[in-house]
Image (cartoon, helix red, strand yellow):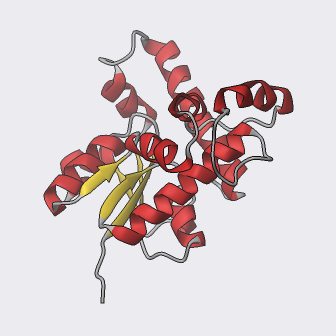
Amino acid sequence: MDERTVITIGREFGSGGHEIGMKLAEKLGIKCYDKELLELAAKESGLCEELFASQDEKPTNSFLYSLVMDTYSLGYTNSYVDMPINHKVFLAQFDAIKKLAERESCVIVGRCSNYILEQADIDSFDVFIKADIEKRAENVADRVELKGDELIKFLQRRDHKRRVYYRFYTRRKWGDYHDYNMMLDSGMIGKDKCVD
């Protein structure tokens, strides 16, 4: 019997979800995938890697946008032919996440991975990392050149994009405790305790 450990991490922007995922993977002796999934999905799908970066966790219903962006995916060699580019990118990530979880133990950060693995009937332990907005602002203050209310608005916009993306592809509420095995407040208990 194959005993894989697959952990997914959903996270609010600035809560430290990426860092927690990396440390957890290191502690468990497995790989952590976050933005690396974009490269993997591009490679496996045959779609242009730049498309994945431009579409990363950004849904769009715009037919015109998808049509224009589609010109960049010429040369693909798979079954994603007759659909808007944002759907092609999501389905390529879906396939990459599924294949990854089928073949190895790993930590996967974001990209609706908890939902994808549920739909693929692959066991995973799903965690959501949150923190109050002031703590998240502290966490990202050295990475962005915004301060005060502008920084708070920036965090709210990033969370809104994640919320809309998750809702668009899952028809579920992002961050709802029903979709996770564990929810952790990194602002309250700290990132190291989250890893533990």
Q: Nearer the viewer, residue 153 or 121?
A: 121
Residue 10, given in percent of the width and then of the height, sits at 46, 52
What is the quadrant of residue 95 in the picture?
Answer: bottom right
In this image, 60 relative to 112: left or right?
right
- Quadrant housing the N terminus: bottom left
Nearest the viewer among 64 and 158 is 64
Judge whether residue 175 can be spotted in this image: no
> Can you see residue 29?
yes
Q: Which residue is drawn at 68% across and 52% down?
A: 169
Q: Position of residue 25 (x, y in %)?
A: 23, 55
Image: 62 above or below 149: below
Q: Tell which of 126 and 190 is nearer to you.
A: 126
Q: In which quarter of the image is the C terminus?
A: bottom left
- Identity of the residue drawn at 33% across and 42% down: 18
Q: Which residue is drawn at 40% across and 9% down?
A: 145
Is residue 88 found left or right of 110 in the rendered image? right
User: What is the quadrant of residue 144 in the picture?
Assistant: top left
Instruction: Give the percent coordinates (x, y) of residue 94.
Output: 56, 57
Residue at the far right in the pictured view: 63
